[in-house]
Image: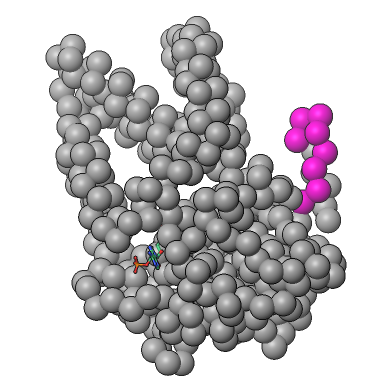
Amino acid sequence: MAKIKFGDVVENIVTRKEFPLKKALSVLKGKTVAVLGYGVQGPGQALNMLDNGVKVIVGQRKSTKAGSSWKRAIRDGWVEGKTLFSLEEAAAKGDVVMMLVSDGSVGQVWKQVAKHVTPGKYLYFSHGFAYVYNKLTGVKPPKGVGVIMVAPKGSGTSVRRNFLSGAGINSSYAFVPNGMKAKDVEDMTKAIGIAVGSGYLFPTTFEREVTSDLVGERGILMGALAGVMEAQFNTLRANGHSPSEAFNETCEELTQSLIRLVDEKGMDWMYTNCSQTAQHGALKWRPIFRKAVEPVFKRLYASVVSMKEAKEVIRDTGCPDYKEKMAAKLADLTNAEMWRAGAAVRQLRPAEKARADAETAAGVQGRKGGK
Ligand SMILES: NC(=O)c1ccc[n+]([C@@H]2O[C@H](COP(=O)([O-])OP(=O)(O)OC[C@H]3O[C@@H](n4cnc5c(N)ncnc54)[C@H](OP(=O)(O)O)[C@@H]3O)[C@@H](O)[C@H]2O)c1
């Protein structure tokens, strides 16, 4: 393991240098990896492992509906009866059973596949949800099944895109030997972590992962991001600024310029590349915003720890019509004036339009070099 210093704290991490793909493939030699679920993470992880030379099969419930995950799997080149099976069949064939169905449905799927997850096999997750909230999900692997987690810190779409570009996506990892030899379970966890295309792997526990992940996505990564942006956009609009001006000052300048500078060399680097006027004002308002939102983050953290968030996820996304329900909620976001303004702004970017059209035609997560 490599040691890396984060300020005063030294952490152990795993990179492709200490655990190269060759080593990962030797751990996975002779093993069949069954990816159950072909939603967002399923395609990214399954295709990356396949391209890396792992024996992968996909388990997905069948549906001939347009836009279904089953049809997408076929479109991506998985072949029914050869590399694409029902959830149960795939679980029976897999030595490593990767649970990449939605967190809301994982309890229902576990009831179908549990009998095939027998001692000597590995049970894999990309989130601590199913295992930590087992009082809600019922996921309790029998003794002798190694429980492993690799949780990519990015969308499944980026897991695939960054793999194809060579960048990778960082992932956290954890494992519970559960009666198996600890070293074997640790090696399998790292092997899968490398095979799915992680940039570097950092250790966590199932509990810490699920808590930080639920807070992060409800907070700055998604919930707070959209909420704070909308608050500023609406304030500008209410004061007579045009949609174009309000959108450019709220989102476009961030995504096209400033956040890229943060990515490159940090927040202070972004600040120093802005005007004195901008830096002066931002430094004054930074603590005011921090103070205003800290109580919301405390409330959010408590809501996650109390399992309220998990119960709501299972209630609202574990139902048969979960896609329709989510689509209706998302329409609210898409139709908000701010995001309609964003769509119009993006249409004015010729290169972006050509890229989006090409991606739609090819399918974002298609196999390497085509399909
Ligand atoms: N999304 C991400 O980028 C991301 C990032 C990091 C970690 N994770 C974790 O990765 C795991 C998978 O997440 P995801 O976002 O890829 O999944 P998702 O899109 O939420 O789930 C879709 C998959 O679950 C299946 N599914 C849903 N309800 C089902 C049911 N009742 N019975 C059988 N199958 C059902 C879907 O099949 P149908 O299409 O047939 O409904 C589809 O295969 C989760 O633990 C998640 O927290 C996700």
Percent coordinates x, y for residue 125 in the rendering: 59, 61
Give the quarter of the figure containing the C terminus: bottom left
Placement of 7 over or under 157, stated as above or below = above
Q: Residue at x 71, y 47 (%)?
A: 204
Determine whether, in the image, residue 229 is placed left or right of residue 124: left
Seen from this angle, which residue lies furthest bottom?
A: 82
Q: Which residue is drawn at 73% across and 78% down?
A: 120
Residues drawn in magenta: 6-13
Locate residue 117 relative to residue 307 in the image: left or right.
right
Q: In this view, does 59 lie above or below 261?
A: below
- Residue 42 vs residue 348, the one in the foreground: 42
Colouring scheme, one of rainbow, by chain, secondary structure, one colour: one colour
Q: Is the magenta stretch mostly helix, strand or loop?
A: strand
Write the residue at 51% across / 31% down: 303
Residue toward you, 79 or 59: 59
Does 206 appear above or below 106? Answer: above
Quadrant of residue 266 within the rendered picture: top right
Give the mark count: 0
Position of residue 68 measured from the top left corner of the image (x, y, whole percent) = 29, 70
Give the residue displayed 69% in from the left and 55% down from the top.
173
> Where residue 42 appears, x then y in whole percent?
47, 67
Foreground residue among 182 and 131? 131
Ligand 1, image quadrant it occupies: bottom left
